[in-house]
Image (cartoon, helix red, strand yellow):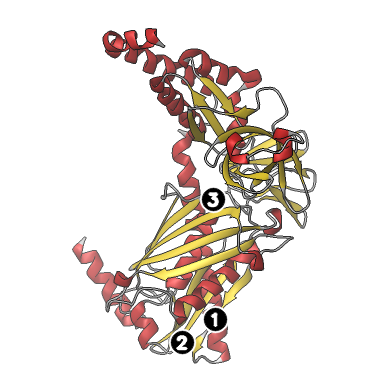
Amino acid sequence: MIFVEDKDLVIPGDVLADEEYHTGRGTFREGKNIHSSLVGLVAVRDKRINVIPLQSKYIPKRGDVVIGEVTDIRFSMWNLDINSPYSGFLSASDVFGKEKRDLNKAFDVGDVLFLRVVDVDEVKKVKLGLKGRGLGKFKDGILIYITPTKVPRLIGKKGSMINMIKDETHCDIIVGQNGVVWVKGNPLMERVAEKVINMIEKQAHTSGLTDRVRNMLYKILGKEIDEEEVERIPEVDED
Amino acid sequence: MKTDREVIIIILNNNNNLRADGRDFNELRPLKIEAGILEKADGSAYLEIGGNKILAAVYGPRELHVRRIMRPDMAVIRCRYNMAPFSVGERKRPGPDRRSVEISKITADALRPAIFLEKFPRSTIDVFIEVLEAEGGTRCAGITAASVALADAGIPMKDLIASCAAGKAEGNVILDLSEEEDKEGEADLPVAIMPRSGNITLLQMDGHMTPEEFENALDLAIEGCQKISAVQKEAIKNRYGEENE
């Protein structure tokens, strides 16, 4: 027996199903019944029942790509804030090899890096690495923070959503699994992208979102080109 | 309209169980809860019950830097209950005092059993309760608000803790004491429960009651908690109901 439907909003303690079903993410079993442990939306896959949280924190997982900010420099490593209950570290040897150099000449406090989670050990020490395509330091651009569980929605099926935003705003956009999004482009377009991404986060659990995002983009962009064509276009040409 | 009201007052007076504010013995004060009202907190709630106005904020799970309280197998929960200097009639000296330190501790103790702390080892969940206006029963109101804020923060929980007090004033066992009834009355019994299982997570008492009166008061308080629980659920659903449209 199942007592809820797919995409229903549930809160902690709500009864979801009985023993026929398996507990998935965001649920727990008490006696015979399965209950929700979160405020979120029900997602049923075969006989497994999950609750997708509407609000969550990033828990580091090996292999994830994340965006982190350098918070501290130690003797042989950098400490990074990865928007999570657990901070990460990047070894100097990972960047310089065996060579000895000043750490703050490579990355200074406040720098934003694109990294891969190499390992998470038992004591929740998060080892980060820079080996891989596209990983490294960001220059300029803005950061947008979203709830990590909404990252898949922002990317869309095979990147449909994110590619649409990239094409329309001509911005470079990189999404970390930890819910940090880096956007770089024309300052005006960065703001447009930020607005759209925040809208996606708010409406992540609704259907037909891609169409609404497209409409929003067209509306904003159409309007702005009309209003600011005269002043803005020479500036764009220079770039 | 006016005549209707007059009739009701006469009847209650005849029954002789009317309280100073016109409530029945098992009636809560008007209750209002709103979830997710603070921008920067991970979760938050605003609660009004009678003359109480309470703000609760939750941060976390987040990194814990205090090594000595860190738990390798679970998260720790830290609470701070604070009364604003302007929350009571006579200005309260700001800062923690003996009473607020006690309430901070019992709030953490009341909330802890409901949270799946083992999901976030070596981290902390911080709960801040600010009493903006006080009118009796702030500790229970604080717990109720904090538990809504925890749910809003997306922290996994077994149940939403609900809390309210019962007690004895002018010889009657009554629910949800006001400031007046608390001060003048004979006993106060704050209770917090997990509404689904009925497990009690907080039980305090001061004053004097006979064992029978205690049983009565406890039943009354649990009944009150169940009513509060319904309002809590409503508050959380309302928060996300808007976004559904």
Q: Disc 1 to disc 3, how far (Cα)?
A: 28 Å
Q: Quadrant of residue A220?
A: top left
Query: Which quadrant of the figure contains the C terminus of chain A?
Result: top left
Q: Disc 3 to disc 2, how far (Cα)?
A: 35 Å
Q: Amino acid at mark 1?
A: Gln
Can you identify the residue that label 1 sits on? B204
Q: Is residue A64 above or below residue A78?
A: above
Residue B187: assigned label? 2
Q: Dot 1: within a 10 Å radius of its alpha carbon, few (fewer than 14), some, or many (20 or more) residues?
A: few
User: Mark 3 or 2 closer to N-term?
Assistant: 3
Query: Which quadrant of the figure contains the N terminus of chain A?
Result: top right
Marks 2 & 1, CB-CB < 8 Å contact: no
Q: Is residue B208 above or below residue A33?
A: below
Residue A62 left/right relative to B113: right
Marks 1 & 3, CB-CB < 8 Å contact: no
User: Mark 2 or 1 closer to N-term?
Assistant: 2
Instruction: Confirm whether residue B24 shows in the render.
Output: yes
SS label for mark 1: loop
- Chain ID of residue with mark 2: B
Residue at 41 percent across and 65 percent down: it is B130
User: Mark 1 or 3 closer to N-term?
Assistant: 3
Residue A233 left/right relative to B3: right
Q: Amino acid at mark 2?
A: Ala
Residue at 27 percent across and 79 percent down: it is B90
Mark 1 or 3: the one toward you: 3
Instruction: Confirm whether residue A8 shows in the render.
Output: no
Mark 2 or 1: the one toward you: 1
Q: Dot 2: within a 10 Å radius of its alpha carbon, few (fewer than 14), some, or many (20 or more) residues?
A: many
Can you identify the residue that label 3 sits on? B153
Residue A189: assigned label? none
- Chain ID of residue with mark 3: B
Residue A84 image offset from top left, x and y in percent: 61, 46
